[in-house]
């Protein structure tokens, strides 16, 4: 059974930090590129960060560059999103997604809420 379970969301003040985790099971993690998306109320889901299956290449949404860092631990089947200098506009539900390196399949997690507010 494929599972992607996000954790680490919550309420944080502007300027604060959070670290999201996404634990994967039920598929061969090292064959999948991993990404984080977010969706704010009334807005479309957007790609925040992506990391290739080996962890050697990353890309980011322009508005989070220099503040967010995506990483993965292939020994733990887990992908992370370190979020620093958080802003109210970062408030959203954050989802992780696994995409097969040959595009054969993809999986979504259930999402974790991040709220940045004073």
Image: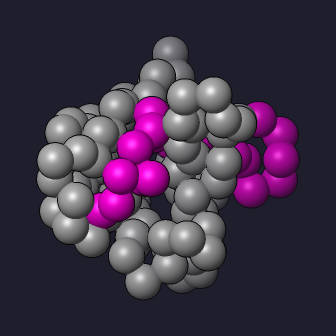
Is residue 32 shown to the viewer in this render? Answer: no
Q: Quadrant of residue 98?
A: top right
Range covered by the magenta-colored residues: 86-105
Q: Is residue 98 left or right of residue 11?
A: right
Between 59 and 63, which is closer to the camera in this rendering? 63
Which residue does the image show at 57% across and 46% down from the upper left?
37
The image shows residue 35 at horizontal and vertical percentages of: 57, 53
Work out which residue is located at the far right of the displayed protein and give it: 103
> In the picture shown, does residue 84 fall above or below 118?
below
Q: Quadrant of residue 33?
A: bottom right
Q: Is residue 54 left or right of residue 87?
A: right
How many marks overall?
0
The image shows residue 118 at horizontal and vertical percentages of: 16, 47
Q: How is the image coloured?
A: one colour
> In the picture shown, does residue 14 fall above or below 59?
above
Is residue 10 shown to the viewer in this render? Answer: yes
Which residue does the image show at 83% across and 40% down from the upper left?
104
Check if residue 70 falls in the magenta segment.
no
The image shows residue 81 at horizontal and vertical percentages of: 36, 59
Which residue does the image show at 55% across and 71% down from the upper left?
63
Check if residue 96 falls in the magenta segment.
yes
Work out which residue is located at the far front of the displayed protein and give it: 118
Between 117 and 27, which is closer to the camera in this rendering? 117
Which residue does the image show at 32% across and 40% down from the upper left?
114
The image shows residue 87 at horizontal and vertical percentages of: 34, 60
Q: Is residue 76 left or right of residue 34?
A: left
């Amino acid at each position: 059974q494929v599972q992607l379970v996000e954790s680490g969301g919550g309420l944080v003040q502007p300027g604060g930090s959070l670290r999201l985790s996404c634990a994967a099971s039920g598929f061969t993690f090292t064959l999948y590129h991993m990404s984080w998306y977010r969706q704010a109320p009334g807005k479309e889901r957007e790609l925040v960060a992506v990391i290739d299956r080996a962890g050697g290449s990353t890309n980011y949404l322009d508005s989070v560059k220099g503040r967010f860092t995506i990483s993965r631990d292939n020994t733990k089947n887990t992908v992370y999103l370190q979020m620093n200098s958080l802003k109210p506009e970062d408030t959203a539900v954050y989802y992780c997604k696994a995409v097969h390196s040959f595009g054969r399949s993809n999986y979504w997690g259930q999402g974790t809420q991040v709220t940045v507010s004073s």
